[in-house]
Amino acid sequence: MDPELGPARGIRAGLPGRAVAARRSAGAAAAGVVGSGAVRFLSRCLRVLLDVAAVASLLLAVGVGVLWVRGRDSCEVIRHVRWWEEGGRGVLRWYAVESSAGGVAIYRASLTPVAPRPDGRLVSEGWRVNRVVGLKEYPVLHLPYKGVHDDPAAGLRGYNGRWRGFQFARSVASSVGGYTREERTHLTMPCWAWLVAFTALPAARAVAFARRRRRERSARAGLCPACGYDLRATPARCPECGRQPAKT
Ligand SMILES: [Zn+2]
């Protein structure tokens, strides 16, 4: 401990007992220094992770904003398509983001042949962007059923729940075009709902940052971080609100 800090200040402020207390707490701090150091390191890691997640979330919010504007007069689909071979069969799978008419859907779909095909050796992977101007259709509402839908004769099993622009749908069609099994999972939400979801964390981080800045500023000015009372005479404990500012 730096003798210039803490105890000297306490004595000057007319609290001679504080020097003893400070020495005692310094010993306790030395014993717990490994534990508190690890805790501080972990909490700093957590803070960095949260900040990275907040930035990513903010970028996603910007992306939703762009899709919202572009989707007013068009339907846009961004897909990552992968087509690979599995036991002599070409399996097609894609992940997609689809936007139109104030909503954005994310979905995953796959087509798996139930029997090997002669052209099953096709293997490709890549991004595709499709844009259809003038289409007013809400994303992925072209699914042909609503609610729980099981049709064993048609080989279809699925669920399609919709509520005010929100939609969750999942379907498995065991035979499409005679030879494929098709699987789809969709989640659609209105753009405003995506924006709320993606701005929540950045907003919380901004509030936490502002609060920390304010605490640090009042600590530097010798004020109570809770109520702003001048603590230069009593740095250990605020006589106004009883708060004990953390020692820095
Ligand atoms: Zn106070």
Image (tube, helix red, strand yellow):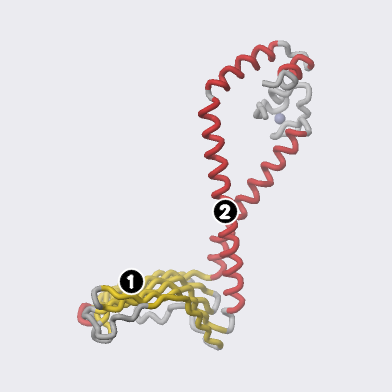
Is 237 situated left or right of 200 in this image? right
Figure quadrant of the C terminus: top right
Rounded to the nearest angstrom, the CA distance separating label 1 from label 2 is: 36 Å
* Mark closest to the chain's N terminus, 1 or 2: 2
Along the line of sight, the residue nearer the viewer: 17 or 138: 17
Would residue 146 be visible to someone looking at this image?
A: no
- Amino acid at the residue labelled 2: Val
Q: Are marks 1 and 2 in contact (CB under 8 Å)?
A: no
Along the line of sight, the residue nearer the viewer: 48 or 70: 48
Residue at 69% across / 22% down in the picture? 236
For numbered disc 1, what is the local secondary structure?
strand
- Please state the quadrant of the image where ligand 1 appears: top right
Residue under numbered circle 2: 52
Along the line of sight, the residue nearer the viewer: 91 or 240: 91
- Amino acid at the residue labelled 1: Tyr
Q: Is mark 2 within 8 Å of ligand 1?
A: no
Is 192 situated left or right of 179 in this image? right
Q: How many marks?
A: 2
* Residue 184's disc number: none
Residue under numbered circle 1: 159
Quick one: label 1, few (<14), some, or many (20+) residues within 10 Å? some
Figure quadrant of the N terminus: top right
Is 189 situated left or right of 161 in this image? right
Quick one: label 2, few (<14), some, or many (20+) residues within 10 Å? few
x and y, in percent, of residue 18 in the image: 69, 15
